[in-house]
Amino acid sequence: MHVIEGAINSPKGYKAAGKHIGVKKKRKDLSMIISEKPAVVAAMFTTNKVKAAPVVWNMDIYSKQKPIKAIVVNSGNANACTGKKGMEDTVLMAKTTAESFEIKEEEVIVASTGVIGVPLPIEIIVKGIKDLSKDMDDELISGLDAAEGIMTTDTTIKNIAVEVEIGGKTVTIAGMAKGSGMIHPNMATMLSFVTTDANISQELLRKALKQIGRDTYNMISVDGDTSTNDMVVVMANGMAENEMITEENNDYKTLYKALYYINEHLAKEIVKDGEGASKFIEVAITGAKTTEDARKMVKSILTSNLVKTAMFGEDANWGRVLCAMGYSQGDFDPEKASLEFEAAGQKILLLKEGLPVSFDEDYAYKLLQNRDIKINVFLEDGDAKATGWGCDLSYDYVKINGEYRT
Amino acid sequence: MHVIEGAINSPKGYKAAGKHIGVKKKRKDLSMIISEKPAVVAAMFTTNKVKAAPVVWNMDIYSKQKPIKAIVVNSGNANACTGKKGMEDTVLMAKTTAESFEIKEEEVIVASTGVIGVPLPIEIIVKGIKDLSKDMDDELISGLDAAEGIMTTDTTIKNIAVEVEIGGKTVTIAGMAKGSGMIHPNMATMLSFVTTDANISQELLRKALKQIGRDTYNMISVDGDTSTNDMVVVMANGMAENEMITEENNDYKTLYKALYYINEHLAKEIVKDGEGASKFIEVAITGAKTTEDARKMVKSILTSNLVKTAMFGEDANWGRVLCAMGYSQGDFDPEKASLEFEAAGQKILLLKEGLPVSFDEDYAYKLLQNRDIKINVFLEDGDAKATGWGCDLSYDYVKINGEYRT
């Protein structure tokens, strides 16, 4: 597997584009991904009880287990909490996309992201979809524009592409995502789209995403909020012409590894660009009783405002880490817990088998001045482990979210 | 019932004092409450799996169901995550208190609050307890000093006293608390001490606190973190000489009401003084399917960083409220939900039966400039309801917690 310069339109048979159409003031706010051939699809949708209209639309399509051909996304408005009108608008987005690209409306996945509770400016979007389809006819297109068109408070484009060889054929996999606020374990809270020309059965693609999602998207947290809108969608159109993957053979393993890489990369990029984030934090727990216990503790640490502000303040306040494990509902023996901070290859042990280790505060402070921090927890309760990713809580998070609509 | 000028030492038979002994740099850091006669006790302790040494000590005493005579509290150091040495230090605090006041060590409740994971400066505390007991002999004492001695990042003293008449006798009830950071539903995360001279059975006192705690302390949130240390302790020494309350008669109801008032007051004071809080937020949900559903949703709204930053930004971003309800695990029908903001007697309806109501942004902004904001949610799923209290998330929260130890 190697990373290539490319974007969501790099796998064979995909076109993608992004455009400013006027939902947002200046930045691109409409993106389109089109697959020439029907693509099998795997997806994850928000677990929030309040689901935005496009999520409802997509879950219905998804349950029908049919291939799809398009993903249309607007940013700037989430079309959430918008009642019947919201659902009508989503259907209109799918219909307009279907007409513009001469496909069926049930082949169109719809996504919206942005402010909640405001009706979609649907005329602008309908016109925008038509305009964008013309641009795509004229080949005025770019996969990076598509990655830009789904951004909200993101400060960086999240884009990646890799190639692998499967059965003598070159298979390309590409992904793009948006995140920033409202990122929290249990899916929800971001948009992530992956395209591949791999030839794989729907069943196996869905199985792979379920496993990968659990260890990547579901292990990241920016602010503990789980949004109404978000989703991961993987399309596979088979145009690489590898022999169809229908069982968990070596071809599957090769593809799985690449898919894992793409999704882990996007998940990490999302937290690195968390709203106002100045630190990227990895938490790894080993020696836990069960994987579920380890996950609970990792998530609790990543979600704790006190841990997050300590990281922002570059303060080795490890007691807050232990405290967050304590209220996580994950089972562990605090008297056997050890804990270290790690950055730039340096480590500092702070707790050894339940007892504080006296440490050099200056050294710890220096270590925590790095942007990427690891918190390693060693338990003696079993063999299970989990890893997750998050960010600190900064002044800018408060600023960005205090002023989001204004 | 009427509020009186008084403090934790106002009920008959109680002495209290607070003093600076040197755990903290300048502010008072040791407090003592002594009851002349044995007092029955009701208490709640943190649910965090990582319990500080004093919590472990107290839970042991509490389980023995014996009356107590003293509460000793140091601030500046939580004696949490301090291993065997921590437990020895707690026992020494109890022993020193017992010797100084000629009582038994198992009559002493111990509390510590402050930084986690640093050994207690126990020599300073032992000397401090002895010095304080001399001050108390000399009557150099004040209940307000005791309320001051338990503060950490608190900016205000939390103190209250009321009088009620029970069976022709004047009964006094007083309380003091500290809070600020790490305040979250399910107890934990603050110290709250209540004294009364009421004559009531231990059984009924414990029953009353259990009910009251559920609706007061367990319905407040500052930052979603649940600390390792905290507790509510109610002492009743019987010196008002009312006929002992042993059943849920009118006397019980009168006392219950006063106890409820004191504890609700202290709980609210704690969130009003939440770290960096610039807003006091009350969330009330009615029409829920079950009380448990209503509680879950109230807590989820109060804990959401996105709701909290919106309140800080005085932004009527009600979609975040609905979103927080959606991921709360509380059951409700979003399509029947209505939602309004309320402040200073003014209301603004934002969502009516699942549909956004167009509203005057300027009016909403003006309304949200008030310090005290109510978020009222009306469901049509049943008759259950719940209310809770929290605060916004401000720059100062980040500042305070980024620099807590430094």
Image (tube, coloured by chain):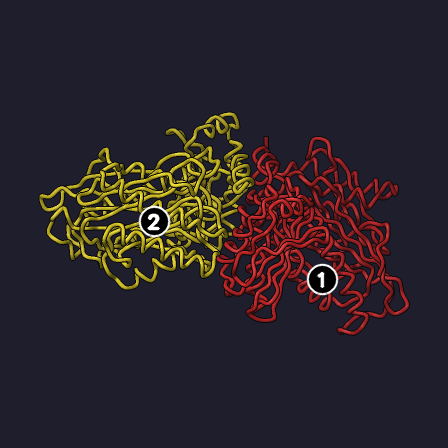
Chain colours: A red, B yellow
The chain identifier of the residue carrying mark 2 reads B
Relative horizontal placement of residue B83, taking residue A73 as reference (left or right)? left
Count of marks, rendered view: 2
In the figure, B130 relative to A47: above or below? above
Q: Are marks 1 and 2 on the same chain?
A: no
Q: Residue farthest to the right?
A: A168
Question: What number is the disc on residue B326?
Answer: none
- Quadrant of residue B201 within the rendered picture: bottom left
Relative horizontal placement of residue A156, taking residue B342 as reference (left or right)? right
- Quarter of the image that includes the N terminus of chain A: bottom right
Per the image, the residue denoted by label 1 is A66
The chain identifier of the residue carrying mark 1 reads A
**Crowding at mark 2 (Cα within 10 Å: few <14, some 14-19, many 20+):** many
Label 1 to label 2: alpha-carbon separation: 50 Å
Q: Residue at x 40, y 55 (%)?
A: B89
Q: Residue at x 56, y 56 (%)?
A: A357
- Quarter of the image that includes the C terminus of chain A: top right
Relative horizontal placement of residue B221, taking residue A376 as reference (left or right)? left
- Quadrant of residue B292 within the rendered picture: bottom left
Closer to us: B374 or A350: A350
Where's residue B351, x and y in %? 48, 39
Three-letter amino acid code of the residue under disc 1: Lys
Three-letter amino acid code of the residue under disc 2: Asp
Mark in the foreground, 1 or 2: 2
Per the image, the residue denoted by label 2 is B215
